Image: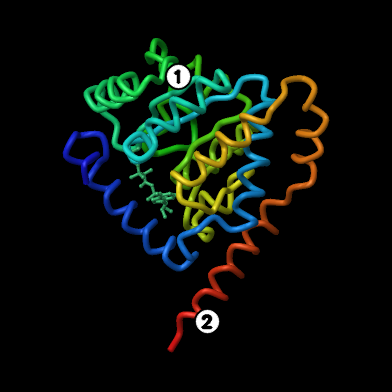
Amino acid sequence: MDGYEKGITSAHGLIAHGRGEAFDYILGEQTSENALKATNVACAYLLTARYPILSVNGNTAALVPEEIAEFCALTGIPVEVNLFHRSEERIKRITDYLHAYGVANVLSGFEIITLDHIASNRAKVDTQGIFKADVVFAPLEDGDRAQALTKLGKVVLTVDLNPLSRTAVTSTITIVDEVTRAMKNMISFAKHFDGERDKERLDTLKASFDNFQNLKASYVVMQKRLQSLAP
Ligand code: PTJ
């Protein structure tokens, strides 16, 4: 609500947040074993990428500004503010908000181009950000863009409490967890990264992962929790 009142989160973002809360309740409001595994693998992709980018929308900016600042300072990954409900005014407000939390490298939108196959404003991307990136970390993504970015050959990493969403099933790695918990876990993982020395370990971790099997593990978590809650 605070993010909405500050003009960071959109009205649609509030609805998306409520949807997320409902799924989190079904998931038991804690990080599952499979979510932690997906988080570590996503982090491995970011740490070994040629050019990674963190795509931030209104919900993510409002929920985890400190964590974005810490994670980006640790890894050197730049941020692109990319919005579904896009306006220059909102982009500036979110950019200023992230700067105030110490996020140093927020791209300024110098050259924006429009990607094919995306109907929404999220098609507008920075040539120095999402367009150029090989690995795109986009928490709370929408299905159209996750699908389009994957089609463009990019590795798409997302955080989504709904393991059934189109984003969840079309991304390369889906972290089925609440974004605050997921970002904290990413920070812990990145702190233990030891540059080139760890590259082989990270590549092995990446190769061991199957997103579909991991999503299936989330469906099982939900199924068990619903069974335990039923009167
Ligand atoms: O700021 P904008 O204009 O870019 O708009 C952002 C929203 C989130 C409104 C836009 O991207 C959108 O409509 O997304 P969707 O399609 O509603 O997808 C958001 C997904 O995030 C849903 O599947 C929610 O369950 C999930 N979600 C909501 N809150 C959280 C979450 N996942 C993790 N952590 C949360 N706190």
Quarter where residue 19 is shown: bottom left
**Which circle marks residue 126 in the picture?**
1
Left or right of 54 on screen, residue 43: right
- Residue at image point 54% right, 53% down: 176
The residue to which callout 2 is attached is: 227
* Whether residue 93 is situated above or below residue 142 in the rendered picture: above
**Which circle marks residue 222 in the picture?**
none
- Residue 90 x, y percent position in the rendering: 25, 28
Circle 1/circle 2 CB separation < 8 Å = no
- Residue at image point 28% right, 20% down: 96
Quarter where residue 45 is shown: top right
Which is more toward the observer, 161 or 133? Answer: 161
- Residue at image point 49% right, 77% down: 226
Give the farthest residue toward the left.
5
Quarter where residue 101 is shown: top left
The quarter of the rendered structure image containing the C terminus is: bottom left
Tell me the amino acid under the disc marked 1: Asp
Tell me if the residue at label 2 has its CB under 8 Å from ligand 1.
no
User: Disc 1 on helix, strand or loop?
Assistant: strand
Q: What's the distance in space between the residues labelled 1 and 2, CA to CA?
A: 46 Å
